[in-house]
Amino acid sequence: MKFRFLALFLLAFVGACFAASAKPVPVLAKFSSPKPFSGERLFFVLDSLGGGGNWMEWEAKGVNDPSVADAISSLGAKPEMVWVLSERKKPLFAALVAQGAGEMLVFCEIPALDAKPEPLKLNEVMDPNVVFRDYRQVSPNEFVHRDQDNLRVMVSEQRIRFAYVNPDKEPLKFDADFSTKTIVEKKALVREYMDFLKYEYSLMLRAFVQSTHGVFNWQPWHWYMASWNSKYLIKNEELEAILATGRAPAYFSVFKAKTAAGEWVEFRANGNGFAEMVISKP
């Protein structure tokens, strides 16, 4: 499949999102504004309710969680934007809805994020004005994030490459004597490195996945869920084999998936402040 950036007009939400039989979802809070929310005010309210957590924007073209579909249906109107925060016992749902000349933010608590895991895939048609709406285009094939100059995307017919550079003050230390350690010590080190790489993975998700729109079929929160990502993440035995060489690798392949259409999606980090996500065709 070629990466085709064609004009795309988003269709109205249909089907399950607005099914008449959807379960009602109790509203926790509402915030109204006589005029459209400013970006600053909007995220102030979101952060106030979410405690500074990671609000993730819902993708209309992504896999739909039944609980999220129920919450959208309960609004009684098509939302302008929808977010989900999963870092709590019950996920928090937020929707921005038009209200006269202004807008209203509606918050609900949903029981769980309950979509059944699906294989990762790329959406066939991607509009750059949607995908890269948080970026500015600096050349025919390069985009730079509007708020983070060190987050860039290079686009070609064969691949899309996201790169983030933020050198660490203290580079990741690599233990050259790993092979001489006891089994207990080895397991402890593998766990320590694995925790670090999972943290790097979460940063890459925020930088690469959550800064774009309409690229993948997974919702942003699905990338964090073990039931969705476990078979694609680096394994303990892979990490142990790397450590056993006694030499720091050029990078760690933290996540690698092959789609049904044959594309590869890979997250890589060197542990010293450089990370990238590469989407490549066969």
Image (cartoon, rainbow, N blue to C red):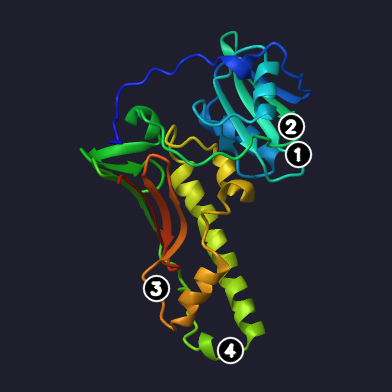
Tell which circle, 1 or 2, labels the residue nearer the N-terminal end.
Answer: 1
Distance from the alpha carbon under mark 2 to that under mark 4: 47 Å
In front of the other: label 4 or label 1?
Answer: 4
The kind of secondary structure element at disc 4 is loop
Q: Residue furthest left?
A: 140
Identity of the residue drawn at 49% across and 27% down = 61
Q: Which mark is residue 181?
A: 4
Q: Earlier in the sequence, mark 3 or mark 2?
A: 2
Q: Find disc 1 in the rendering and name its residue.
A: 90
Closer to the chain start, of discs 4 and 1, is 1
Does residue 153 appear anywhere in the picture?
A: no
**Disc 3 from disc 1: Cα separation:** 39 Å
- Residue 177 in view (yes/no): yes
**Front one among 172 and 230:** 230
Quadrant in which the N terminus is drawn: top left
In this picture, residue 131 sits left or right of residue 199: left
Q: Nearer the viewer, residue 35 or 139?
A: 139
Q: Where is mark 2, residue-wise?
A: 110
